[in-house]
Amino acid sequence: MYPSESYPNTAYILSLIGGIFIILAGIFLSVVGAVFTLFLGGAGAIAGLLGIVWGVIILVAAFNLRSNPSQHVTWGVIILVFSLISWWGAAGGFFIGFLLALIGGIFAIIWSPPRQKAPQAYAAAPTPQTTRYCTNCGRSIPFDVNYCPYCGKELA
Ligand SMILES: [Zn+2]
């Protein structure tokens, strides 16, 4: 189960590291792609550059997740989707980036705020009876007396 946290810290950390790996993979692939396509003006760098963009999006989503935990589903889905997209352009952040961001995204989605303190049980209980009425004279009398203080009738 997801650890109980006041904000989705585990999801944030995993997504952050995953996003960094994806950016690094994107940088690496863009350099390699550029080198191998020098005769085309380095056009091969484009895929890797996209990988960098995916990583940056994951980082932004991770930061938003941390600052707006109530939107954890939205940012979790974005992290999840871009961890999958990272296979295109960033080789899944050498797999580790994909894996961390994927788990981070899932953790972000399933995170839930700490349970609110339950209302105190006795607040809903019926108010105990504190007064009663004499069966003989009808006056209001204390609950714990055996005889009516007004007319003296013995009470059950
Ligand atoms: Zn009485």
Image (cartoon, rainbow, N blue to C red):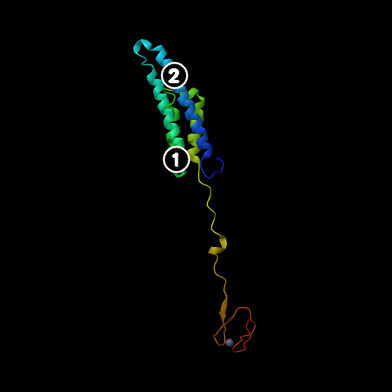
Q: Image quadrant for the C terminus?
A: bottom right
Decide: is 115 above or below 152: above
**Front in this rendered view, residue 114 or 39:** 39
Decide: is 103 above or below 40: below
**In terms of sequence position, does the residue under pointer 2 or pointer 1 come before the other?**
2
Residue 86 at x, y percent in the picture: 44, 26
Say if residue 83 shows up in the picture. Answer: yes
Residue pointed to by mark 1: 73
Q: Residue at x 51, y 37 (%)?
A: 11
Residue 48 at x, y percent in the picture: 41, 21
SS under mark 1: helix
* Quadrant of the rendered image containing residue 81: top left
The amino acid marked with disc number 1 is Val
**Front in this rendered view, residue 55 or 94:** 55
**Front in this rendered view, residue 15 or 155:** 15
Q: Residue at x 35, y 13 (%)?
A: 41
Foreground: disc 2 or disc 1: 2
Check the image and name the residue furthest to the left. 40
Check the image and name the residue furthest to the top. 39
Relative to residue 37, is residue 144 drawn left or right? right
Residue pointed to by mark 2: 29
Q: Residue at x 46, y 19 (%)?
A: 28
* Quadrant of the rendered image containing residue 1: top right
**CB atoms of marks 2 and 1 within 8 Å:** no
How packed is label 1: few (under 14 Cα within 10 Å), some, or many (20 or more)?
Answer: some
Say if residue 76 shows up in the picture. Answer: no
